[in-house]
Amino acid sequence: MKNTGNRIGWKVLLAVLLVATPSAQAGGRQVQERAAKRACMLGDSKKGVEILADLYLNTNDPNYIYNQGRCFEQNGENEKAILRFQEYQRKVPAQAAATKPPGPATMAHATCPTGKPAQISAC
């Protein structure tokens, strides 16, 4: 009889863990997103991009690649930003990419190593 109670207890615990895990992961993801945003806004692009890379690896959501580009861009690292925007465009279908505007690093104020104005397909 005692053995049956243990089995039921384990089943209940397993069910609770399976239900709680997605919401806990979502909460953890929100904490990471906030930490990345904070790091980027405070000028620590290395830390912000590192957190965004972990988020991408965990979710496969290419928006985190786009946000890496924005982080670099906000911190004046336009060459790195362009590379991330290009990677984003490779990861998403052309139609989906068209719905998200390119970051300002792709505009005329960004420059390639050659000193020429940068375009998203240049450099």
Image (spheres, rainbow, N blue to C red):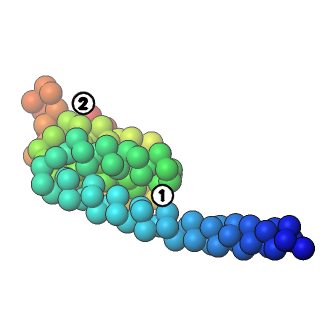
Residue occupying the far top of the picture: 114
Picture disc at residue 95:
1
Q: From the viewer's side, name the closer residue of 123 and 84.
A: 84
Asked if residue 99 can be seen in this view, the reply is no
The residue nearer to you, when weighing 25 against 12, is: 12
Badge 2 crowding class, 10 Å Cα cut-off, few under 14, some 14 to 19, many 20 or more, is: some
Q: Position of residue 63 (x, y in %)?
A: 40, 55
Rendering quarter of residue 99: bottom left
Which numbered disc covers residue 123? 2
Residue at 20% in and 59% down: 38
Eyeballing the image, is 12 above or below 122?
below
Q: Name the amino acid type tagged 2.
A: Cys
Residue 106: give x, y in percent of width and height. 22, 47
Q: Residue at x 43, y 68 (%)?
A: 27
| Residue at x 37% of width, y 66% of height | 30
Secondary element type, mark 1: helix
Choose the circle earlier in sequence order: 2 or 1: 1
Q: On the rendered structure, is 48 left or right of 55?
A: left
Residue 31 versus residue 92 in the image, above or below: below
**Quarter in which the N terminus is drawn:** bottom right
Name the quarter where the C terminus is drawn: top left
For this rendering, which residue is in front, 19 or 66? 19
